[in-house]
Amino acid sequence: MSQIIDGKLVSRQVKERVAGEVSQLKEKGVTPGLAVIIVGEDPASQVYVRNKEKACEEVGFYSEKFALPADTTQEELNALIMELNERKDINGILCQLPLPKHLDDKEVINLIDPIKDVDAFHPVNVGAIMIGDYNFLPCTPAGVMELIHSTGVDVAGKKAVVIGRSNIVGKPMAMLLLHENATVEIAHSKTVDLSSVASSADILVAAVGRARFVTPDMVKDGAVVIDVGMNRDENGKLCGDVDYEAVKEKCSYITPVPGGVGPMTIAMLMQNTLTAAKIQNDMM
């Protein structure tokens, strides 16, 4: 029987740690500030932004939301980014994705000052992660590492398989595992015999975006299974990339959906914003 990795508990611990440091910064006259930009009325994005605002309040950040209409032009959005780059009270800038189709998210990401890029999407930050000399880590992969650490499992020397190769999760996830001396394999839609690749993993991270894609034959006995997926099944019920009920008897640790990786993403955003504030105020 596996042990459930409680993402709500671990995320609360991260936020408490951040809040403690924020109190110390405030005593020195510094309040970390996060700007969140949302364009249009995407319901999922609205929920994410509300959750980020709530987390900022919990840890003691100053936060400012910029809700722009769906017909905002690239020039208007770019101008806002440039303005926020110059503001001393804003340490982190987050532009909620996806953007409406007429806007270029790559252009927006490239415009954000790398030292305020708390999503760690800017090419400068991506390159820093590659060489292992970084200020920020992408929030979801960083959260996954916190969850693995919470189990007490030593990553060094373990075989890790990441299913999925996105720029936001899959690729950086592989790099973070590699930095901790795991032997890492990235599997994807073109992987030959994906089931046998996945079942060789001591640590299996599923980030493929397909409901209940990972079945028991893809999981090694005693593996740590991290489910990054957030999908709806045929009945509209929230579920992950892992067939949780079928797999949980086989692994040593597993994350649920919801309540696993999800809460960690926002907790690590708080950590990144705190780090940005410390760097910009020469407090590292």
Image: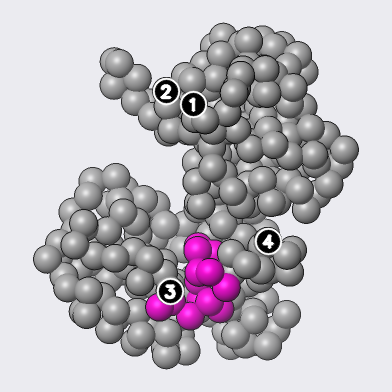
At which x and y percent is residue 253? 70, 25
| Labels 2 & 1 near each other (Cβ < 8 A) | yes
Closer to the camera: disc 3 or disc 1? 3
Q: Is residue 31 magenta?
A: no
| Labels 3 & 4 near each other (Cβ < 8 A) | no
Name the residue type under label 2.
Ala
Closer to the chain start, of discs 2 and 1, is 2
Closer to the camera: disc 3 or disc 2? 3
Residue bearing mark 2: 211
Q: Nearer the viewer, residue 194 or 251?
A: 194
| C-alpha distance separating marks 4 and 1 | 26 Å
At which x and y percent is residue 234? 30, 16
Instruction: Kindly state the secondary structure of the residue where label 1 is placed.
Output: loop
Q: Nearer the viewer, residue 222 or 51?
A: 222
Instruction: Kindly state the secondary structure of the residue where label 2 is placed.
Output: loop
Viewer can see residue 10? no
Classify mark 3: residues with Cα within 10 Å, few (<14), some (14-19) or many (20+).
Answer: some
- Which region is colored magenta? 111-124
Classify mark 4: residues with Cα within 10 Å, few (<14), some (14-19) or many (20+).
Answer: some
Is the C terminus in the top left, top right, bottom left or bottom right quadrant?
A: bottom right
Name the residue type under label 4.
Met
Residue bearing mark 3: 110
Q: Is residue 110 left or right of residue 70?
A: right
Closer to the chain start, of discs 4 and 2, is 4
Q: Which mark is residue 241?
A: 1
Q: Which mark is residue 141?
A: none
In this view, the residue farthest toward the left is 71
Instruction: Kindly state the secondary structure of the residue where label 3 is placed.
Output: helix
User: What coloring was used for the rendering?
Assistant: one colour
Residue bearing mark 4: 130
| C-alpha distance separating marks 3 and 1 | 31 Å
